[in-house]
Structure formats: C-alpha cells, structure tokens
Image (cartoon, rainbow, N blue to C red):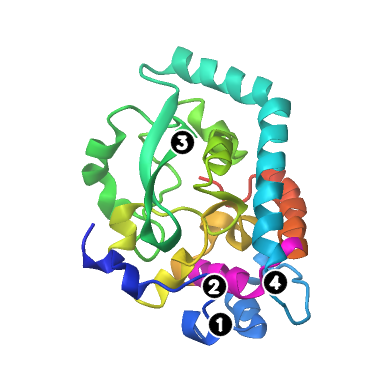
Amino acid sequence: MNAALNMDDLPDADTPAEQLGKSTLPPTLKIVPAENRINMPTGKVRHTRVYPFAKRVFDIVFAMTMLVLLSPVWLIAAVLVRITSPGHAIFRQSRVGQHGTPFTCLKLRTMVPEAHSLKVEIVDQNETTGPVFKIRADPRIIPIGRALRKFSIDELPQLVNVLKGEMSIVGPRPALPEEVEKYSPHQRGRLAVKPGLTCLWQVSGRSNIGFDEWVELDLEYIRRRNFWFDLWLILLTIPAVLSGRGAY
C-alpha cells in the first residue's frame, strides 16, 4: 500500500469526534434518504475501559454460537457454490482492518473465479459514488451468488475473522486496499476501529446509500459506540438482512 495508509495519518479509536469529522446526529439523519432513516438512541456516550473488553468477549461468544447454529446454512451454501460454479467455495481477499492493518477476509464465493480480471470490462458501469464499485446486474455473479448476497449468507465465514480478532461483530465494513488508497483524511477516520459484520450502513439501506453518507454513518458509529448501541444494531440487522434491501 502507498502512503495513503501511513499509520501516523490514521486516528485512534479514542480520537475525539471533531477530529474524525464534524458529524453530529441531526446532519447524519438528514443525509440519509427518508425511506432509509432509522431511529438512533440518544444520549451522551461515555467510553470506559470496560467496553473494549466486553466487546471482545461478546464477539468471541457470539461468533462461536453463530458458527455452530448457522453451520448447516453456510455448509449447504458452500456445496451449492461448488455445484453451480467451478472453483473454491471460500473466497479469500485482502481487506484493510483497524489502523490500516491488512488481513485476509473470508467470504463464500459469489462471483466467477476470474471476476477481478473481468472488472476492467465493466468498470464504467459503476452505480455508486466514491472509490467503491457496485452494480446491480453484475455479470460476474454466479447463479446462487445473488441469493447469498441478498441475505448476506456470503459473509458468514467472516465469523472466523471475528474469532481471530481481525474483525468485530459491529463495526464499519472492511474496505479493499485500492479503495482505501483513494480515501481523503476525513474518510480514513472509519479505520479507527475494527471492521465489522454489521454497522449503521448495513441497517440503513446498504448499497442504496452513497459513499459519502456511508462514511458519515461509520463516523457516527465510532463517535457513539458502546455495548448497548452494538446490541441495538445487531437486533436491527435481523430485519435488514431478511428484507434484502440494498443488497447487490
């Protein structure tokens, strides 16, 4: 990675909100489309030494429990991936973690094996803003891939990343290195905490939200994070995933 990921340029998890970006609750709600708005808990957040410990313990217990309970789901999904498309069922990709630290992110493969090389042929069809690439009718997606993406089943292997301490259950979604290289100093603020499986963006409309709004929601989470806020987001994730809204 280039100098865009200089550790000295990245904020700490305890960086004051004003240094992460002047994001406050009312402006954040205003920039999210009306149909995607959610009611956020109010009140001043106090970060304590207990929170990081409690969050890590919860991550381990929750990840282990979900790996066991949902093992039939992702095992069946992995078999379907192998049956409907040549190649491995598990897709390994370099992502950027807390403070710019790279790690190998695990997913169930939803695209053809040569998806990366084919991207250059469709890059001009990008339907989102910023450094992120997303299109609804991506021709690289395999038949079973759309269903896996819609209900976030492809992300279940990331529970292993949570157990390894590379991710958390709740936190900004992990970005690609080439995306982070294009971040502004303001946008790098989302790297102050561990990436997560779910976040404010996930429960607010996912890909229906532009990148600038996405960043502001992540910074809002970092500013307001606490144990109960994390639990609240996990609960909101259930209907968000079942509805499949904004997933493609």
Q: Helix, strand, or loop for circle 4?
A: loop
Q: Which residue is mark 2?
A: 219
Q: Which mark is residue 17?
A: 1
Q: Report the front residue among 230 and 218.
A: 230
How far, Cα to Cα, is label 2 from label 3? Answer: 24 Å
Q: Residue at x 45, y 64 (%)?
A: 191
- Local crowd at mark 3 within 10 Å, few (<14), some, or many (≥20)? many
Would you place residue 139 above or below residue 42 in this image?
above
Q: Main secondary structure of the magenta part?
A: helix
Q: Amino acid at mark 3?
A: Leu
Q: Helix, strand, or loop for circle 2?
A: helix
Label 2 with label 3: CB-CB less than 8 Å: no
Q: Quadrant of residue 68?
A: top right
Label 1 with label 2: CB-CB less than 8 Å: yes
- Local crowd at mark 4 within 10 Å, few (<14), some, or many (≥20)? few
Q: Amino acid at mark 4?
A: Thr
